[in-house]
Amino acid sequence: PTIGEILPGLRKFEIGELVFASFSCPGSGEWEASWAEHDRIMHVLTGSKSLRAAGDRWDLEPGDTLFIKKGANFLRQNTRDDVCIFVFFVPDEFIRTTLREIAVDLPVLPSPAEPRETAIRVQHDAGITAFLQAMKVLFGASGTPPELLLKLKLKELIASIVVSPANAKLSSYLRCVA
């Protein structure tokens, strides 16, 4: 089967190794193995999804967002119902470049310590909510958005996470990557 048959409604924007994807997965109830080549952020729009890795389990419902570290081996399960998700694949070099660009404007933050978790829940605040809303608009529009706009949106998301007290673990991990 083609990727379009496997993932109906797939819409993606690629800029080198940066990938912005929106798609629906048919419900199966089955567990499938997966591996994360790059850090990724997964946001559930509709349906539900479960992930398991290293003894942990994350049950995701509409509105939930999860950061999955690169190199993670995990199992994912869709419920019997279809699930629609956004996934943003973010290579280390993009994280490093973004954090170097904003370093002088960052508040004093605790020293980074890499969290051991394979995945970290993203707590929504105004910046993260604004990013997700913008992506809904961009995925819903016809055509492809300018690359500059997509890069700026992703930099905005990284900056929002790094300065968010509610996302201290994820902030620490991103600063370790940088």
Image (cartoon, grey):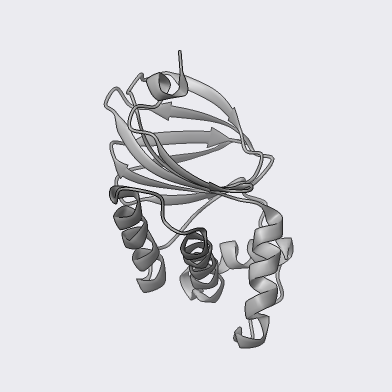
Residue pictured at 33% horizontal, 26% vertical: 79
Q: Quick one: which residue is furthest to the top in this view? A: 1
| Residue 131 relative to residue 172: left or right | left
Residue pictured at 46% horizontal, 64% vertical: 149
Q: Is residue 165 visible in the rendered structure shown here?
A: yes
Against 165, is 167 above or below? Answer: above
Nearest the viewer among 34 and 20 is: 20
- The quarter of the image holding the N terminus is top left
Residue 122, horizontal then vertical, whole percent: 46, 58
Residue pictured at 70% horizontal, 70% vertical: 112
| Residue 158 relative to residue 80: left or right | right
Nearest the viewer among 151 and 132 is: 151
Number of marks drawn: 0
Against 39, is 36 above or below? Answer: above
Residue 120, horizontal then vertical, whole percent: 53, 53
- The quarter of the image holding the C terminus is bottom right
Nearest the viewer among 82 and 116 is: 82
Asked which quadrant contains residue 86, the reply is: top left
Against 167, is 65 above or below? Answer: above
Against 12, is 161 above or below? Answer: below
Residue 168, horizontal then vertical, whole percent: 56, 69
Asked which quadrant contains residue 28, the reply is: top left
Residue pictured at 48% horizontal, 60% vertical: 150
Residue 13, horizontal then vertical, whole percent: 47, 46
| Residue 81 relative to residue 67: left or right | left
| Residue 131 relative to residue 161: left or right | left
Q: Is residue 114 visible in the rendered structure shown here?
A: no
